C-alpha cells in the first residue's frame, strides 16, 4: 500500500445574509381620519343616550295605571299590603299586580323593601 496523503482544501464561503425583515407598517390616521373616527364615536354615544332617554320616558309616562310606593314594615305581607292599598279590590288580583310591578319571584317580602303598588 502506498502511503499517499490526502489534503483537503476548504474555502470559507460567506452565506448571503437574509434580507432585513420588513417591519409591520402601523396604520396611520390622517387628521381627517381622526376627525371621522371621533364623529362616529360621538354619533354612537348620542344614539345610545337617545334610546336610553326614551326608555326612561316610557317608564315614567302616565299612560298606564297609577302607582305608588310602599315601604314594607316588619310583619307585613303582600296580602296585607294589597288589602291596605286597594281595600275594595280582590286581594289576589292586587298581590299578582304587585308581584308583576316589582318582578318578584314569589310573595315573600322583607322589612324595609320598597314596593311599587297600584294606586287607588
Image (spheres, rainbow, N blue to C red):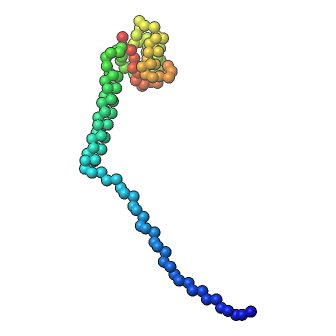
Q: Is residue 60 left or right of residue 102?
A: left
Residue at screen point 33% across, 33% down: 48
- In the figure, is residue 35 to the left or right of 92? left
Q: Quadrant of residue 89?
A: top left
| 65 over 45 or under it: above or below | above
User: Which of the two residues, 59 or 39, is positioned nearer the viewer here?
Assistant: 39
The percent coordinates of residue 114 (x first, y second) are 40, 23
- Residue 79 drawn above or below residue 88: below
Q: Position of residue 65 (x, y in %)?
A: 36, 14
How many callouts does the rendering have?
Answer: 0
Q: Residue furthest right?
A: 1
Name the image quarter holding residue 44: top left
Residue 80 seen in the current view: no
Residue closest to the eye, 58 or 4: 4
Residue 17 pos. (x, y %): 45, 72
The quarter of the rendered structure image containing the N terminus is bottom right
Q: Residue at x 30, y 30 (%)?
A: 50
**Point 31% across, 33% down: residue:** 47
Q: Is residue 55 above or below residue 31?
A: above
Which residue is painted at 56% across and 84% down in the image?
10
Residue placed most toward the observer, 62 or 33? 33
Quadrant of the drawing holding the C terminus: top left
Res. 65 in view? yes
Amino acid at each position: 500500500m502506498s502511503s499517499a496523503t490526502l489534503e483537503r482544501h476548504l474555502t470559507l464561503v460567506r452565506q448571503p445574509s437574509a434580507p432585513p425583515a420588513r417591519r409591520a407598517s402601523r396604520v396611520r390616521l390622517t387628521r381627517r381620519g381622526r376627525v371621522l373616527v371621533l364623529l362616529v364615536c360621538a354619533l354612537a354615544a348620542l344614539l345610545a343616550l337617545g334610546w336610553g332617554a326614551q326608555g326612561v320616558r316610557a317608564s315614567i309616562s302616565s299612560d298606564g295605571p297609577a302607582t305608588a310606593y310602599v315601604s314594607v314594615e316588619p310583619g307585613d305581607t303582600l296580602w296585607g299590603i294589597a288589602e291596605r292599598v286597594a281595600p275594595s279590590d280582590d286581594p289576589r288580583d292586587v298581590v299578582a299586580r304587585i308581584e308583576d310591578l316589582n318582578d318578584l319571584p314569589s310573595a315573600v317580602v322583607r322589612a324595609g323593601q320598597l314596593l311599587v303598588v297600584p294606586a287607588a
